[in-house]
Amino acid sequence: MFRWAIFLGAVILSTPSHAARCGGDFNTFIATMSQEAAAAGVSQAVISQAFAGIAQDPAVLAFDRRQRGTFNKTFEQYVSTRVGPGRINMGRQMLLRHASLLSRIEQKFGVPPEIVVAIWGLESDFGKGDVGKLPVIRTLATMAHDCRRTELFQGELLAALKIVQRGDLPLRDLIGAYAGEIGQTQFLPSSYIKYGVDFDGNGHVDLRHSVPDVLASTANLLHTAGFKAGAPYSEGTANFEAMREWNRATIYRKTIGYFADRLMGR
């Protein structure tokens, strides 16, 4: 669930040039979004399938309204709940298991394996934890119809439709968390489109099932944000600042660095 805090402040989103009117009748809103999607190049077949029988999800709005003060703990309090011996041991196993893949990712994107694996562990317990169970289109349509961040989530809704249009994930597999985050490192759809990498070479960016795609896309996000190979990533460094694209919260970025250091025995 931490992608909520990570992305909403950090990702620059493309929003519709003519935003649909929020609030009011939900079906009317969806009809306008269908027009926006068509104008953005999404096929009528994808639009019809995605919006068939769609309804608002009250649980999504309720969760959104509870998301305040996520990072109101001290660093010591927070890191003790996120980086324990079990997660460190599993992370070290992942470094060994995927050593060759992580080496190729580091060569291409300049992000060290321990940073990539630390993020992977924090976000989804290396793909084995909770990555969300909600239909992404319904979640994003609910949030876009709500007037508090309508343009932001209209952009995310269009990006989600483009993921299906591109053939990266079928609609049945477009499942995510309470803000529409997708996959093992919890990318919002706009970041999926912007940073996603087909690193296993199968012609699709699959951030739910393909470990090469997941890890390379995570590294690509940091690389694009200015992460420099071989440079330190502790608080106050340029790389620590580059990680703002992942999460603006200082406490979370410190946790990434702390976890990465523990993985390397530092």
Image (cartoon, grey):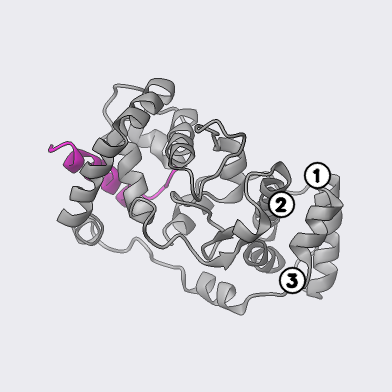
Name the residue beneath numbered marker 1: 40
Q: Quadrant of residue 26?
A: bottom right
Q: Which residues are magenta?
A: 246-266
Q: Quadrant of the C terminus?
A: top left
**Mark 3 or mark 2, which has the lower sequence index?**
3
Which amino acid type is marked by label 1? Ala
In the depicted structure, whether residue 162 falls above or below residue 134? above
In the depicted structure, whether residue 177 falls above or below residue 264? below
Name the residue beneath numbered marker 3: 54
Residue sitting at x 78%, y 54% = 46
In the depicted structure, whether residue 158 falls above or below residue 48? above
Which amino acid type is marked by label 3? Ile
Q: Position of residue 158 (x, y in %)?
A: 72, 51
Name the residue beneath numbered marker 2: 161
Is there any visible trace of residue 20 in the rendered image?
A: no
Q: Position of residue 142 (x, y in %)?
A: 67, 69
Q: Is residue 169 left or right of residue 47?
A: left
**Mark 2 or mark 1, which has the lower sequence index?**
1
Q: Quadrant of residue 51?
A: bottom right
